[in-house]
Amino acid sequence: MNLRKISLCVIGLTIGFISCKKDDTPTIEPIEIRDRTEQQVVDMDSLNNYLETHYYNASDFVSNPNPSISDIIIKKVKANETPPVGYVKLKDAVGESKKTVYAETNYEYFVLKLNQGGGNASPTFADNVRVVYEGFSLQNVIFDSSVIPVLFDLTGLIPGWNRVLPDFNTAESFVENADGTVTYSNKGLGVMFLPSGLGYFSQSSGAIPAYSPIIFKFELLQAYQNDHDKDGVPSYLEDINGDGELFDNTDGDFNPSNGFPIYDYLDTDDDGDGILTIDEDINKDGNPRNDDSNGNGIPNYLDKTDVIKKQ
């Protein structure tokens, strides 16, 4: 799926092709890596222009108890044209931009919230989500979509998704049909408008060139809490510094086979004290974050100085 992050192996293959002799394979020009802050300025100009010149069918969502992405119609309206009846300018509808930090860069993006969703659950940035979606460019070129509900791990998607979906609720209910399909009612529904830095940035994705702002329509149907390493701590709680990313590595260990860090959310012994994180849940309440044996304010599973004995 194009929605997933570009693998490092793709970068490696690209480098390999570039290094080949001219008489072996055609030369592939390397993509210039741009400054993220400078690119964000360019992308915001493009996004604001799109939002100022495009309208959506707002009236079709009034008293609509179960809207879907198929109901969303976005049209470009020129300066000398009158918008269709019932349409509202996107810039007026999205309001102020949302703000986040990613890759040490300040980013802004926009969200059109069409339905909050009637379910009791909202995903965290580290959870699995079941969605229907459509991705397209500012030139209205569709580059990825799924009309059939698909399950994604938000940690494996472009960063815009794990910023946007936690602000929506899942579907209120669902019914399993005789033909094997599932019908969802009152699901979360919206459109996200992302700068390239929260999308694919310097990587192209199908019909989308590098450094392209992108748009996704989406329905949030279901969400499932992740504990990637099965250590008893939900993955979103392993964001120790609270930056919305899972690059925390308390004991600083690395995988000896590839040299990659073993981040806490993938590490069954976060503090490297030889005691599994799940065994540092001494009061057995299912949350090791509540256990602090020596009272120093650091949970046992992050503290090598705790007084737990090996099980």
Image (spheres, rainbow, N blue to C red):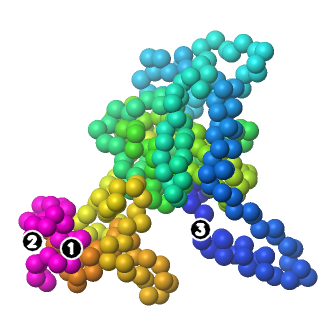
Q: Is mark 3 on a helix, strand or loop?
A: loop
State the residue at coordinates (34%, 70%): 264
Q: Position of residue 191 (x, y in %)?
A: 54, 36
Residue type marked 3: Ser
Viewed as shown, does residue 245 lie left or right of 82? left
Tell me what residue is drawn at x 50 percent, y 84 percent.
Answer: 258
Amino acid under label 2?
Asn
Q: Name the residue under label 2.
A: 294
As for residue 300 lying within the magenta part, the answer is yes
Mark 1 near mark 2, Cβ–Cβ under 8 Å?
yes
Q: Answer with the quarter of the image where residue 276 lies.
A: bottom left
Left or right, 15 with reference to 9: right
Describe residue 92's horizontal placement relative to residue 249 as left or right.
right
Dot 3 or dot 1: first in sequence order is 3
Residue type, mark 1 in image:
Asp
- Give the residue number, with chain letter if any, for mark 3: 7
N-term mark: 2 or 3: 3
Let me know if residue 224 appears in the view. yes
Q: Is residue 216 above or below residue 64?
A: below
Magenta span of residues = 283-311
